[in-house]
Image (cartoon, helix red, strand yellow):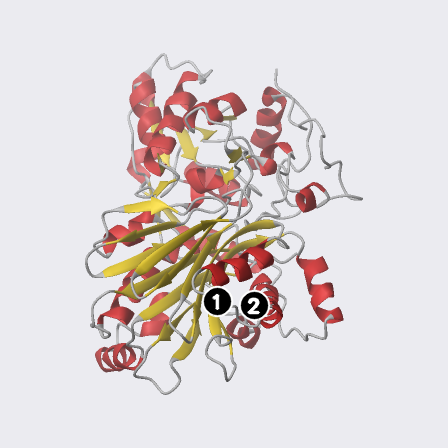
Amino acid sequence: MVGEECGVCACILKKNNSFALPQILYTLLSELQHRGQTSSGLAVFSTNSKKRLKSCSEVGRVNNLFRSYDKNFFNNFLLNNSGECGIGHVRYATSNVSDDMALVAEEAQPFLRRHGRPWKKFAIAFNGHLTNYSNLKEELINEGYYLDTDVDTEVLMHLISLSLKQNNGDLNFPEGMFRIFRDVIKRLDGSFCFVFLNALGDLVVARDKFGFRPLVIGENESMIGVASESKALIKTGIEKFRDVLPGEIIVVRDGKIYSFMGERDCKKAHCHFEYVYFSDACSINDGIIVDEVRSNLGKVLAREEKLKFDNREEWVVVPIPSTAIPIAVAYSQNSKLPLSFALIKSDVGRGFINSSFQRKIIMDSKYNVVPKSVFGKKVILVDDSIVRGETSARIVELLRVFGAKEVHLRLGEMPIKFPCCYGVDFPSFEELILGNFVGTKEESEKIVAEKIHANSVGFVSFEGLREALGGKSDFCFACLNGEYPTKAGCNFLEGKKRVCQGMKPMWRSE
């Protein structure tokens, strides 16, 4: 399965200050670092460069790309990548990707499509997953294309190239650019946000019609900025921004923004996991403040709590940092239990997106415990979600080693039960702690508690999750209930599990 959760960004300067561009891209990429640590890269357009459009990427984090810890390298890098417009990308690879660093480097983005004609030479950075990737790849091979990688971005790159060829560039700007990308997007099934930059300095930004992944655009007197999350734009001084609408295609040239609406559905499917886990708490996705959603989850969790707290002094609420902190704070306040940051997190990356060997290293080194905070206490351990359960089991064990009398896990949402085919690298059914399980909420909580050796497990009900998200229905919950919103998604697990269009949710309420 090809899939990734990444971050994309773009910047167009309005004023002649080309040296500011790489610094702005550095800020944008750094603010999106939590969305991917496998590789990072940028592509820059400059009228003063012989190449006009060039790209560079590096395995690892943004600091590996810019070498900000090396003053001379950093300054030279900024100088060599100055320009008027640029795009950037941070990526994490799936657990199926080889540990071969050469392969990881080859798949780093943005991808650069070389060509002698400037309107055919372009760079592209992509976030999401094309559910019909295999079919599109086969079609391209039949067209005579040869693919070097197994990532969605290369397929998209060749589709754009093919559309440019078939439309002879359609240089009627900006309508021609819109028609080219509209024709490409019609062939795509799945989730995507992408930024495209050609050797004429034209920027194209697009978001799928369901709005799976967040994407925002904004501007100030100096620049136009695009990013996967609003907090990145705010960090660069852009305070006025809006969501790129589901199905919207934006074309930018010479500081002017042209907006077109491509194919769009009335039913949206924003990924709910962006609010529970992936997005930064400071971000605002589709008009919803991420931090508020997590606080709401804590309130619902406290309201649905079934434990009795007769002697409140022997209890303590401990969040698993860092996305679960707002949930734990709200839970503590609403249940009137003391809060302690007894778990200290090391910066070693996100656990569930790595290979089994890497996850073990991370789990063994990721958390430390403040002993006096949990010794002799009944601990309410709060996390945002549970996927495999390996990290939860390890933390439960750690707390007991440091003297906790009891450990009760509380989760901001029900356990992940279905793989995601829209860009989040959830594992197979066999690895998920409740993969494809059919049962009541109480039965599920009991099974998870037994697997991770906790005294009890409790998680927010499906109704409570929707309440925390504002009561709207514009979300994708496929990883929880098996209802995939796209045609290819409905066939995603055909022949393996009972997932098809019109199927009743596998989750059964009380």
Location of residue 358 with respect to 68 vertically, above or below: above
Q: Quadrant of the N terminus?
A: bottom right
Considering only order in the chain, which callout, 1 or 2, is on the residue closer to the N terminus? Answer: 1
Could you say where residue 481 lies in the image, as x and y percent from the top left? 62, 32
Which of the labelled discs sits on residue 346, or is there none?
Answer: none
Residues under labels 2 and 1: Cα distance? Answer: 7 Å
484, 312: nearer the viewer: 484
221, 389: nearer the viewer: 221
Which of the labelled discs sits on residue 124, or is there none?
Answer: 1
Which of the labelled discs sits on residue 157, or is there none?
Answer: 2
Say what secondary structure mark 2 lies in. Answer: helix
> Left or right: where does residue 243 sit relative to residue 372?
right
Q: Quadrant of residue 204?
A: bottom left
Residue drawn at the location 43% of the way across and 61% of the way down: 174
Residue count near mark 2 (Cα–Cα under 10 Å), binned few <14, some 14–19, many ≥20: many
Q: Quadrant of residue 35?
A: bottom left
> Left or right: where does residue 460 sit relative to residue 13?
right
Residue drawn at the location 46% of the way across and 27% of the way down: 472
Could you say where residue 162 lies in the image, as x and y percent from the top left? 62, 69
| Amino acid marked by disc 2 | Met
